Image (tube, rainbow, N blue to C red):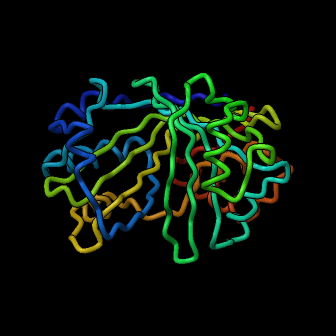
């Protein structure tokens, strides 16, 4: 897998006051607007410094300010969910299992996007051992059938994604920021692996009725919005047989941002 010298954010994050998971869960964004951004680790250092100065707080979970995530995305034999996204189908879904490594908990998650661009997520807890394949769990399979257009017999593990996440909350509790770094992908179909090197994917979740100070911080660092799906980028990079012309533009955008060519092993 490609290697890169990563920046440590442990020091910069100490400048941000902590917020607990219980406090953060109390933040209800009733008119939520989600926007993704793309940058690199060096630029993120400046964003974090400005966030600390502006009074943003960092989520501390299980005693850690940085949380590793491990996710497995599922799809049909013909990559129906990937293709729906590639073909700009408004109503689409994603199915994944996700482990929150520090807490030792795992979930089966179903994300549904409607024709108005709104995304709803449903999830049910599963044993961590079922992260690579939940299909032998009858209760999880029933949950999938009840909350998606697919049943377990139609799906198989497609791609594993690993990354580290930082979560920030603004002083007024009107926006959250998830910052994903060290993104790595493994394709179960092809056996190919890759990483996004020092790329950083940020998602801003804000109350549509409130002003966003973070938008100004990102703009000051020339961090621009970017529509990026981790699953779709992973398939594009690791499955040469997948129809992915539209997402190859996104790959080039990432490479331009980090000034590196992404390679696959």
The quarter of the picture where the C terminus appears is top right
Figure disc tally: 0
In the image, residue 151 above or below residue 22 = below
From the viewer's perspective, tell me whether residue 173 is left or right of residue 6. Answer: left
From the viewer's perspective, tell me whether residue 66 is left or right of residue 133. Answer: left
Residue 249 percent location from the top left of the image: 66, 62
Residue 89 percent location from the top left of the image: 68, 72
From the viewer's perspective, tell me whether residue 166 is left or right of residue 257. Answer: left
Question: Which image quadrant is residue 153 in?
Answer: top right
Q: Residue at x 44, y 46 (%)?
A: 40
The quarter of the picture where the N terminus appears is top right
Q: Nearer the viewer, residue 119 or 217?
A: 119
Residue 21 percent location from the top left of the image: 27, 38
Q: Nearer the viewer, residue 185 or 23?
A: 23
Residue 115 percent location from the top left of the image: 58, 76
Q: Nearer the viewer, residue 149 or 263?
A: 149
Q: Residue at x 76, y 63 (%)?
A: 245
Q: Nearer the viewer, residue 239 or 259?
A: 239
Q: Residue furthest bottom?
A: 116
Q: Residue at x 67, y 32 (%)?
A: 137
Q: Residue at x 36, y 58 (%)?
A: 204
């Amino acid at each position: 897998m490609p290697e890169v010298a990563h920046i440590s954010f442990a020091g910069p994050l100490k400048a941000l006051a902590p917020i607990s998971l219980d406090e953060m869960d109390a933040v209800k964004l009733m008119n939520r607007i989600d926007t993704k951004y793309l940058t690199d680790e060096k630029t993120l250092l400046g964003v974090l410094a400005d966030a600390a100065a502006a009074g943003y707080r960092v989520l501390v979970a299980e005693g850690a300010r940085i949380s590793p995530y491990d996710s497995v995305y599922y799809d049909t034999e013909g990559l129906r969910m990937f293709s729906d996204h590639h073909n700009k189908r408004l109503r689409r879904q994603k199915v994944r299992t996700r482990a929150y490594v520090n807490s030792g908990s795992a979930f089966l998650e179903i994300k549904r996007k409607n024709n108005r661009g709104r995304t709803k997520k449903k999830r049910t807890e599963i044993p961590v051992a079922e992260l690579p394949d939940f299909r032998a769990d009858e209760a999880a399979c029933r949950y999938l059938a009840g909350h998606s257009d697919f049943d377990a017999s139609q799906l198989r593990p497609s791609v594993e994604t690993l990354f580290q996440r930082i979560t920030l909350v603004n002083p007024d509790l009107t926006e959250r920021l998830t910052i994903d770094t060290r993104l790595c992908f493994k394709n179960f179909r092809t056996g190919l692996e890759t990483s996004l090197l020092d790329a950083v994917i940020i998602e801003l979740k804000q109350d549509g009725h409130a002003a966003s100070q973070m938008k100004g911080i990102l703009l000051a660092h020339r961090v621009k919005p970017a529509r990026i799906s981790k699953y779709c980028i992973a398939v594009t990079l690791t499955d040469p047989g997948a129809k992915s012309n539209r997402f190859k533009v996104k790959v080039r955008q990432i490479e331009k941002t980090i000034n590196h060519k992404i390679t696959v092993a």
